[in-house]
Each structure stands twice: as C-alpha cells, then as structure tokens.
Image (cartoon, rainbow, N blue to C red):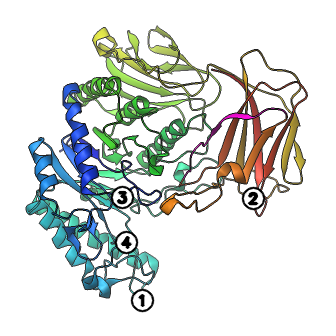
Amino acid sequence: MPRPMFTACSTWALHDELGDTVPLDEAIVLRALDALERWRDFDVFPQYFNIDYGWTDPELGYRHFYRERWPDGPDRVLKRIREMGMLPGLWYPVNGGRLRVPGWQASLSGDNWNYSLLDGPYAQDLSDSLLYAAEVWGVRFFKFDFANFAAAVPGDPRPFETRYALGVERFVEMAARLKRSVPEVITIAHCGFARQDSVGRLGPGIPPLAADPAMLEVIDGFFSGDPQPADLPATAIHRSSDLYQDIMVRAMLECGFPLARIEDHGAMCGLTNTCHRRGREGLRRSHIAQLARGGRRDLFYGDPSLPADDDLAGMAAARRLFMDAWNRNLETAPLGPRPGEGPWHGWMTGGGRRGLVWLVNPHLHSCVIRLPIVNLAHARILFYEGERPALQTQPDELILRLGPEQAALIGLGAYAAPEWVLPPDETTRLPRQTELLSLNWQPTPNGLTATLPASLPAGAELMVIAAIHEGAPHLPGPFPALRIGHQDDRNGVITEPAPHHLVSITVEGQACVAQTPSVSVWNGISWVLRRFASPAAGASISIQSKLDPPRRIRAEAWVVTW
C-alpha cells in the first residue's frame, strides 16, 4: 500500500530558541492559527497542524505542556486545531535533550544531556507518553527529532555500534506500538536519524549518507536535513538552501529511500535564524521544488501570516497540479547529473504524455538544457522566476535555456494546457547576465589579491566570491569545503565571528552594496559573496582571511547585471 499523501503546517521557524531568542508559547500558536484562517480562501489549508520544539514542560515530561508558557494547559489550543478541521501534531526529542525530569535520572547519559533508550525508565515513559498523546490529546502527527540512539548511561561497556543498533530497535518498537494502537498516525523523523548528513556538501572526500532505510518500517517521512546553504555559491541563501535539499534528496534516493518517503523540510517562511530570516523571499520556488522532488506531501514550516495572497494562490495552484499527478499514480525520477555537479539538474513526474519537469540551473552562468523525453509532443512553461526562459520542443526532445540560478516548471502533454499555468514569481531578484572575469589572483600573507583590468559595462556590478576549503594555502588540492561562521543569536550573543569578518572582501574605492550571507548563519557557510558598484579600471580586489590556522581560499570575480 502506498503511504498517504498529506499536508501539514508546523510552527518551527516562527519560533526558535536554539539559534535565536523566540520561544514557543500558547500565544504564538494561537496567532499562527488565526493567520491560517486566511488560507481557507485559497484552498491551501493543511490537514495537520504541528506544535514544534519547546512545548514540553522541562521538569514534568511529555504529558505536560510547559507550565510557564501554557498556564492553562493545552486544551484551548488543541480544541481550536480540531475546530478548524485539522488534526494536531507534536514534536518529540527522541532522547529528551534539554529536559530535566527527576524520574528519568537513572537514564541520564554520560554527556549529561541525552537520556538513554537502553537503560532506566526513560524509554518506557516516552513510549507511554506517545500513546497518551494519541489517545487522550488526539495527536495524529508525530515529529521525532534529536535522536542519539547510542546514548548510554555512565559505565556502559558496550561499543558504539552495539548501542546504536539497540537504540534503533528500542525506538522502532515504541513507534510500532504507537502505530498498532492508532494506525492513522503520521510519523516523520528529523535530526539524528542519519549518523551524519555531510552528503549535502560538495567536493572531494565527502562520505556517503549513513542512514538505514529499514527504519521506514515505522517512519512515513525520513528527513533530508535542516535548511542550510550548500557549498555552491549563490546570490541568495534561499536558493543555496534549495540546492542543499536537492543534493540530500538525490543522495537518499541513491541510498534506498523512495522519494515518496523523504521529508525535505518543505517550504519555510519566517523571520528567525533557523531559516536565515528569509521572510517570504523565494517561498514560491521552494514550495514548487518540494512538490517536484516527489515527496507526495506539502509541508509548510514557519509563520503563516507572512505569505502574500499571491503566494497562497500560487501555492494552491501548484498543489492542485502535483496532487492531480500523484492521484494518477505518476512517479517522480531525478534528471541530469547529481545536483551541483553538472550544469543543471531536475526532477520529472510522469512523462511525455502527461508530465511535470522541474529544471534548475544552480550556477552563476546561463545554461542550455537538451532533454530527451519519449512521446513528447507538447510542452509549456508553467512557472518561472525573472525573465521568461526560452523553450523549444521537437519530437522527443525539450530544449530550455535557463539564466543564472533560474528554475522553471514545464508541463508536458496534458499538463501543457493553459489551465495548468501558474503565476510567475516576479518578486525574486535573479541575475540577468553574468560574466566570469579573467583575473590573475596572487597570494598575500593573509589571502589573495587581483587587479581589475578594465572598467565594467554601464549598470553592471562587480561580484566577488571567496570559497573556503579545508587545506592549508601552500598544499596542493583539491580539498573539501570548510564551513565557517557558525553563528546563533541565543540570548542576543553572537557565538562566533560572522563569515564576512573571518574572510573579508574589499574593492579599492568602492563600498559593498550587498553581501551574502547578510544575516547570521547558525549552520555555517563555506563561501562569502560581496557585490560592489562598478569600480575604476586598475582597482585592487582584496580577500583577507583571519582563519586560524590559514585555509585554502578560491576566488572568483564576476560582472553582473540585474
């Protein structure tokens, strides 16, 4: 039996007290529910509403909402969710990190943070609490997070691999018990279920994903990773984050996870550090990308008050389009090279007779895509950003030109009909034209320098990128990317220097007009990008590094028009 298609809204990114200072409380959830009422008018209303990180009372455990923030308990919110026609969901940390429940003390691990699933009372209490939530509170959506299956009490002599396997078995048992008791529950698994997730990186020396598809026995959606920039530079963090999810989903597919069971974090819209304060920027693109990857679900994370009416109308139309395809049992497959490793990549649902093709140019230069498609007779651009891409078709072949960082959704066959066309996103700024400059970068004691050989065309900007790699500057490469500037804003304190402080870019005689990243990046970044108004010919471009020890930096300079 195929897993059910579902739609959900989760509060994470509306609040964030891991890398920011916005705690979850009852008032935030009620405001989110108020905002969701507007969504009804656009036919994009979710089936599930998930209350994310921070609802649990840290001293009383999983059968109690945080007393200080929910003084009257959860009944008012849970009732409102059900009255609105949704089913409630709750977030659970698999190993109880950050909670300090006295009754769990015998399970506290040696790191004084997690609770072991192997010893003491914790695992049984968690299992019983899941049943309590389903049977008493009516919870039907369970988000599991922060798993540390190998966590052990002090003195446990078992090796890591043994503890990890036993921890996984204990979790599978409790999730199976939950599904036996209430078969209609939906479960998704987030951080910690893969032993590492560095496959989202690009470059040599990157290990493969280490996650076990056998856990799909009890998990409906297996997480592909938190929102974070990939190692390919982009003019906007949200486009780099979309690429990261393409990379991760493709890797999970190759490791045995069906696309319909991969949870790619959906579409995010918020003002907190967890989503790089993106607001609604790029929401339409991220939403279509989520649907195009074949997950057969529509998940929204963050602040439901931020999407504009145009966003909601576009999201509703995109959902109807992909739901129609899924209801016809059309399957999704990846297209092109692995994301970021070739000139383009994409996803196709269906085929030439009736199909949807999502094509992405992840690079700073234009590309032409020639895609063989069996039985192709008709094609139409259904969605694009920036300028309309040039599309040609001929029997069994589609040809598309995408500008820098551009993506487009193409309808094939029956989906090339006018009624399936989605409104374009004219709010997202994309480079119109780019040209890589031929420069002679010279090493300096703390970085690199080059001289601009000629003035730029009228109206153009100079864009300089510095990519940071693991190896020392004097050693031969290649080296994997190195992420720097892991910042958070917890309690208003920046915990590490900003990336642009650690690796700075300056141009003689010009002030910086824009930079990426422009906000704190809690998960770090392996590149920095700055844009400058057109400098004079002969101007010096300088990259200065404060990294200790020094690291290899690769530089590029581009002429960009918008």
3 or 2: mark nearer the eye: 3
Q: From this viewpoint, is residue 6 visible? A: no
Chain-order first, disc 4 or disc 3: 3
**Disc 2 element:** loop
x, y percentage for residue 4? 19, 42
Chain-order first, disc 1 or disc 3: 3
Q: Which residues are magenta?
A: 509-521
Chain-order first, disc 3 or disc 2: 3
Residue in front for this viewpoint, 455 or 123: 455
**Disc 3 element:** loop
Residue 515 sits inside the magenta stretch = yes
Q: Can you say whether 283 is above or below 68 in the image?
A: above
Residue in front for this viewpoint, 369 or 557: 557
Q: Where is the N terminus found, in terms of image quarters?
A: top left
- Residue that appears at 30% across and 28% down: 312
Q: Label 2 belongs to which residue? A: 547
Q: Is residue 428 left or right of residue 540?
A: left
Q: Amino acid at mark 4?
A: Gly
Instruction: Give the CA separation, mark 4 to mark 3.
Output: 16 Å
2 or 1: mark nearer the eye: 2
Q: Label 4 belongs to which residue? A: 97
- Asked whether disc 2 touches disc 4, contact meaning CB atoms under 8 Å apart, the reply is no
Residue 23: give its label. 3
Instruction: Give the CA separation, mark 4 to mark 1.
Output: 16 Å
